[in-house]
Image (spheres, rainbow, N blue to C red):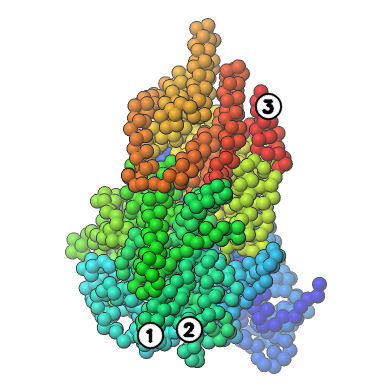
């Protein structure tokens, strides 16, 4: 290797890299890694692991008061290893011209830990210490030996402490997992900050970075041409896999860089650091260009519908003085800059009309500046990107929400901001259809895209009555740039209108792409059932059952999950289902009345399909726990993956009132979404110096009890002290934006917004339910608030102080491309895993992970999914250690890409715990389970079936460790939760009874075993019928327990009572309440299950809403199969049924076999094995998508069988384990 010479750019990059090397801030150590290292050190010291494990999770108290969990979420920051006191640019910079001629590029001042000060010259060849002293530059080398080709090498020569500290840093980074050193291109923001707040120390290097990155001062040559980069990458060849990898990697990197630059630019726009390009126009029409990105504002039109007297600050009227232009006045900023001058001239003709209370017509006219249109435009852009039509281009786009404003960022079409624009519009209309442009070559490309997007080619009339043939909406615009590329913009309505929301105020209520795809596939099944049923049924259930992947995609725009699939083998009957996007709009349609009526009927049919089939099926999945969202984000994801818009939250909530955890979840989501709009209005009106007090005051109004200003006492003392310091009149006006707000006023606004947007009546007791950490977390995440991680007294009048608000971060929606090849491989792998061919599944998942690593890098949500599936394949193949390696990868990626407290991260810890338990590392497993419970309590609160599921797994671990007292407490707690949340007649409640029956059997208390297994059997008979295999298995268990009870009684009469029984009796004598509660619960389940079944059935039917027959039959089969597999294998499903609640039956078998005689245990063992085999054999008969979903589970087996290689299928593995059991 030859040392290259430096130039001015590379030497600065070198200095920046050295600073990164010397910092540990880029190292993100997972708690799981720390726990494993602690376990290793504890084992090395031969610590008493049993005692520690008992203390680790011995109490349930933190589940009751989860405000304590806030302080435990964030891991303590690693101790910084200091190598050098400071490394900063010297004030001798820039080098004088006569020294530039000798190769001097930069001067650096260094202070070592020994206290020595050095001035270092960075030249084109090397770094050396110069002889400068004081304020005079002396460029001569101080010593010939003080020279090195790198800065680190030079520092090691001049400072022994640097050399030692640098070695420690390298060792620390080397000891971490490789993924913990990788930077995420799209990092997730945290809603909690460290408490106490860390001291802010002097750091000259940090100050330099912040000053250098000033807005608008970058060199012109340094700006990137985002549009040219993006379109050039799209033009890369992609005929073979290697070309697709190169193209995908380039596209992903450019798009992520664009999103990063767009976020910085949007923050600069909102903070008024960037001047508008049209400063003479009214403020509401301002547009901005920064770093070759075009920025414009969108308006919260939903909030405009609330009457003025209900708004938080309407007393000042539209003319109030604001430091930031208020954008909530019906402003119509032209986001799409292709014809900005014409648009502005047409829109600014009526400023007075805009500033008045907007009528419905004016709201409709401000279409390009609303939240809904911006969201729809982003989804439409993604759909066209995925269609990938050669010669048809889209802009890079991102939506940034910050400080109450929504900014839309787009790349700039070449030449659009300069020169004559008269000939640039080739297609569509800029004046709402008065004049419609058309171009044949452009139309041909749009038609090709329309076929893939299920859009019909149709004829509309322009303002003069001339017919124009279009294959898109009227308001879309086809532009030719100065680079001669054809761009299509304004894709607000790629999918048809929602016929359930007709009217000008619902102008942009469109259907989701997932629903359109599902409907097209359903219709194709009806038309050609004989040849298409096997494939299409799997594809149809794809968007509806893909909830295990729901959280692995951007939460707000999920069109990439099923973006109108277009397999080449689709027959003609499917392609005939095309939608006219311009029906139910104000545009005039040409053609016969029959054709128009037919187009309208088709759109109405999709709306009916959503109401009559999709939503009832979704409610059925919720009630049967096939879909189990934990928090607002996962709820949004699973709604979108099923093709249901968020505006249907209120309707779905009305159908699940009988299940408390779902009712709380839906109500909290509606309240938080409504409160978000109220808070954004306050933030828009708050000047820079009042943001933290405004946010704290709003949170106090929301969660506490803030009275009117005249009666407010100590609750507002923090704010009142601040007000006394502000004497100027302008400050008092600014204070009025939030100081007059009260809890009653805020909740009145929330209730009105919820009624308007979601048709949901917020009950009066909702304010009590809002005093939960999970609701606070949801609100902070949606608005971008960061609060300190301390314990809050949410029952007090004012739980928050100004100092609790640490940050306000931008929330981003983007159109980063996804790797479709990897997703296809993953789907194929899930099907192979369901069939039991583990070697093929392993190969497919490995190939998918390799693809994702090459294109997106390891820090990506899809890569996490791959690691999870690889872990499951290895676990089922008997390689538990290999499974832990893959699961650890998934856990690290989820923490970095989804967040520390995301439900998927919680499930990752739970899976790690089950794997560790499989290796008999019970203490480490319990530590991971403790983290799982903590994360679940933050995301959903303690009242959720997944929490009960986790408690059962914890109980099984304690049971395996022979700590029966603690195990019974956890089982009892799980039983209470399931009875309260799901009802005494639910199958999950039966699972709890069954686990308790086996636990009592292990203790020798066969009478209690019979009692609880009887409850299990009764529930299964009523829910599944006496002919179901699980009911029969329960009967066999019951028979086994009765036989053991008879044997125990016989032994007792002979005076041979067993020790476990005596121990258990002593235990129950010490805890008499436990026995009474269990006995009462068992009796209650037998009496109340019938009524619960009726209510459950009513909920599944959807309270009288008719359902489609085909979907219901498949759903019933799928649900039955889910319950079968859950009962047989004790598995964990992400965002699906909390199947880890099912007792790990293979583990329990071992316990029972060790506690009872072989003859008594063998029938149950054979029965259970047979059941598992039967379930696996019956699995492939079901549709493929449900199969793939059902495989996303974990079986916590702890039998000591020999690991089976990957070449063996699940069937062979089960047969071997059966033979060993015999």
Label 2: which residue? 425
In this rendering, the answer to whether 544 lies above or below 992 is below
Question: Do the numbered discs 1 and 3 sit on residues whose CB atoms are within 8 Å?
Answer: no
Mark 1 vs mark 3, foreground winner is 1
In this rendering, the answer to whether 687 lies above or below 1148 is below
Residue sitting at the far bottom: 98
Label 2 and label 1: CA atoms lie apart by 16 Å
- Give the secondary structure at mark 3: helix
Label 1 and label 3: CA atoms lie apart by 80 Å
Residue 1051 position, x and y percent, is: 53, 10
On residue 842, which mark appears?
Answer: none
Label 2 and label 3: CA atoms lie apart by 75 Å
Q: Residues within 10 Å of mark 2 (few under 14, many from 20)?
A: many
In this rendering, the answer to whether 579 lies above or below 317 is above
Residue 513 visible in the snapshot: yes
Mark closest to the chain's N terminus, 1 or 3 = 1
Mark closest to the chain's N terminus, 2 or 1 = 1
Q: Residues within 10 Å of mark 3 (few under 14, many from 20)?
A: few
Mark 2 vs mark 3, foreground winner is 2
Label 1: which residue? 344
The residue at the point 62 percent across, 77 percent down is 232
Mark 2 vs mark 1, foreground winner is 2
Residue 10 position, x and y percent, is: 68, 78
On residue 1220, which mark appears?
Answer: 3
């Amino acid at each position: 290797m030859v040392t290259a010479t430096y130039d001015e750019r590379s030497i600065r990059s070198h200095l920046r890299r050295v600073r990164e090397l010397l910092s540990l801030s880029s190292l993100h150590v997972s708690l799981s890694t720390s726990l494993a290292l602690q376990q290793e050190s504890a084992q090395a010291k031969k610590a008493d692991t049993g005692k520690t494990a008992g203390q680790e999770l011995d109490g349930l108290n933190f589940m009751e008061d989860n405000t304590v969990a806030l302080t435990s979420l964030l891991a303590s920051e690693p101790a910084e290893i200091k190598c050098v006191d400071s490394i900063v640019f010297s004030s001798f910079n820039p080098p004088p011209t006569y020294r530039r001629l000798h190769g001097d590029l930069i001067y650096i001042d260094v202070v070592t830990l020994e206290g020595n000060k050095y001035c270092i010259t960075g030249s084109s060849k090397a770094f050396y210490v110069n002889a400068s002293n004081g304020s005079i530059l002396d460029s001569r080398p101080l010593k010939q030996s003080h020279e090195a080709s790198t800065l680190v090498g030079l520092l090691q020569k001049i400072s022994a402490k640097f050399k030692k500290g640098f070695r420690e840093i390298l060792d620390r980074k080397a000891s971490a997992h490789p993924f913990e050193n990788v930077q995420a291109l799209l990092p997730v923001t945290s809603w909690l900050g460290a408490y106490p707040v860390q001291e802010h120390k002097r750091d000259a290097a940090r100050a330099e970075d912040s000053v250098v990155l000033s807005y608008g001062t970058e060199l012109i040559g340094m700006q990137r041409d985002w549009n040219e980069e993006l379109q050039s990458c799209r033009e890369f060849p992609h005929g073979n896999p290697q070309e697709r990898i190169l193209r995908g990697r380039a596209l992903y990197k450019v798009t992520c860089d664009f999103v990063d630059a767009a976020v910085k630019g949007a923050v600069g726009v909102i903070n008024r650091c960037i001047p508008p390009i049209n400063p003479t126009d009214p403020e509401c029409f301002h547009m901005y260009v920064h770093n070759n990105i075009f920025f414009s504002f969108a308006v919260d039109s939903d909030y405009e519908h609330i009457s003025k007297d209900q708004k938080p600050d309407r007393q000042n009227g539209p003319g109030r003085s604001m430091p930031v232009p208020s954008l909530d006045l019906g402003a119509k900023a032209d986001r799409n800059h292709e014809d900005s001058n014409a648009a502005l001239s047409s829109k600014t003709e009526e400023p007075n009309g805009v500033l008045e209370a907007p009528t419905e017509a004016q709201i409709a006219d401000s279409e390009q500046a609303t939240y809904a249109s911006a969201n729809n435009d982003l989804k439409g852009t993604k759909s066209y990107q995925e269609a990938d039509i050669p010669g048809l281009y889209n802009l890079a786009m991102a939506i940034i929400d910050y400080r109450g404003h929504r900014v839309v960022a787009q790349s700039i079409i070449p030449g659009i901001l300069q020169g004559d624009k008269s000939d640039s519009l080739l297609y569509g209309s800029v004046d709402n259809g008065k004049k419609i442009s058309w171009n044949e070559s452009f139309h041909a490309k749009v038609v090709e895209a329309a076929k893939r997007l299920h859009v019909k080619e149709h004829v509309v009339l322009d303002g003069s009555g001339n017919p124009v043939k279009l294959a898109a909406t009227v308001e879309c615009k086809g532009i030719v740039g100065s680079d001669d590329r054809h761009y299509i913009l304004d894709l607000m309505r790629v999918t048809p209108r929602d016929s359930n929301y007709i009217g000008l105020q619902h102008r942009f209520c469109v259907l989701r792409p997932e629903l359109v795809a599902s409907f097209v596939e359903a219709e194709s099944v009806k038309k050609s059932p004989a040849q298409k049923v096997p494939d299409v049924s799997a594809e149809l259930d794809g968007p509806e059952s893909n909830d295990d992947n729901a959280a692995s995609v951007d939460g707000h725009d999920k069109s990439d999950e099923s973006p109108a699939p277009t397999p080449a083998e689709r027959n003609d009957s499917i392609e005939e289902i095309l939608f006219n996007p311009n029906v139910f709009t104000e545009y005039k349609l040409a053609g016969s009345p029959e054709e128009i009526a037919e187009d309208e009927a088709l759109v109405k049919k999709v709306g009916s399909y959503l109401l009559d089939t999709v939503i009832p099926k979704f409610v059925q999945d919720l009630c049967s726990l096939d879909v189990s969202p934990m928090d607002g984000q996962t709820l949004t994801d699973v709604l979108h993956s099923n093709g249901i818009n968020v505006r249907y939250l209120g309707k779905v909530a009305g159908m699940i009132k009988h299940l408390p955890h779902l009712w709380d979840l839906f109500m909290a989501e509606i309240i938080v979404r409504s409160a978000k709009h109220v808070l954004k209005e306050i933030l828009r009106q708050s000047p820079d110096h009042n943001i933290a007090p405004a946010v704290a005051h709003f949170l106090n109004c929301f969660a506490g009890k803030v009275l009117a200003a005249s009666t407010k006492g100590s609750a507002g003392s923090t704010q009142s002290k601040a007000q006394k310091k502000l004497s100027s009149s302008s400050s008092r006006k600014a204070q009025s934006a939030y100081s007059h707000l009260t809890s009653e006023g805020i909740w009145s606004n929330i209730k009105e917004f919820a009624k308007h947007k979601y048709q949901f009546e917020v009950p009066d007791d909702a304010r009590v339910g809002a005093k939960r950490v999970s609701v606070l977390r949801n609100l902070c995440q949606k608005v971008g608030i960061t609060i300190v991680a301390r314990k809050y007294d949410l029952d007090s009048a004012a739980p928050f102080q100004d100092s609790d608000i640490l940050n306000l971060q931008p929330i981003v929606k983007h159109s980063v491309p996804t790797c479709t090849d990897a997703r296809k491989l993953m789907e194929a792998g899930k099907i192979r895993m369901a069939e039991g061919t583990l070697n093929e599944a392993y190969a497919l998942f490995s190939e998918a992970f390799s693809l994702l690593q090459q294109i997106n890098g390891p820090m990506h949500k899809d890569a996490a999914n791959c690691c999870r599936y690889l872990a499951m394949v290895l676990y089922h193949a008997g390689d538990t250690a290999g499974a832990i390696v893959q699961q650890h990868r998934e856990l690290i990626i989820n923490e970095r890409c989804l967040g520390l407290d995301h439900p998927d991260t919680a499930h990752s810890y739970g899976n790690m715990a089950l794997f560790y338990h499989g290796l008999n590392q019970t203490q480490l497993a319990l530590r991971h389970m403790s983290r799982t419970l903590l994360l679940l309590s933050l995301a959903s609160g303690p009242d959720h079936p997944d929490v009960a599921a986790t408690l059962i797994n914890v109980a099984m671990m304690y049971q395996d460790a022979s700590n029966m007292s603690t195990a019974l407490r956890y089982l009892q707690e799980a039983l209470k939760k399931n009875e309260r949340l799901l009802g005494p007649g639910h199958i999950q409640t039966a699972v709890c009874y069954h686990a308790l029956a086996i636990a009592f059997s292990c203790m020798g208390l066969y009478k209690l075993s019979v009692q609880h297994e009887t409850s299990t059997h009764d529930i299964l008979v009523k829910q599944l019928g006496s002919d179901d295999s699980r009911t029969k298995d329960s009967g066999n268990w019951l028979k086994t327990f009765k036989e053991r009870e008879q044997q125990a009684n016989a032994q007792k009469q002979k005076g041979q009572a067993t020790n476990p029984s005596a121990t258990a009796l002593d235990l129950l004598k010490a805890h008499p309440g436990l026995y009474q509660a269990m006995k009462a619960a068992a009796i209650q389940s037998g009496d109340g299950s019938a009524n619960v079944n009726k209510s459950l059935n009513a909920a599944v039917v959807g309270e009288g809403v008719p359902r489609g027959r085909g979907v219901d039959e498949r759903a019933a089969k799928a649900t039955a199969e889910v319950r079968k597999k859950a009962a047989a294998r004790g598995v964990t499903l992400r965002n699906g049924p909390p199947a880890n609640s099912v007792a790990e039956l293979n583990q329990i078998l071992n316990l029972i076999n060790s506690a009872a005689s072989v003859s008594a245990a063998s029938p149950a063992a054979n029965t259970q094995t047979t059941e598992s085999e039967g379930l696996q054999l019956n699995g492939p008969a079901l549709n493929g998508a449900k199969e793939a979903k059902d495989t996303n589970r974990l079986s916590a087996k702890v039998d000591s069988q020999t690991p089976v290689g990957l070449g063996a299928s699940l069937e062979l593995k089960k047969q071997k384990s059966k033979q060993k059991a015999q």
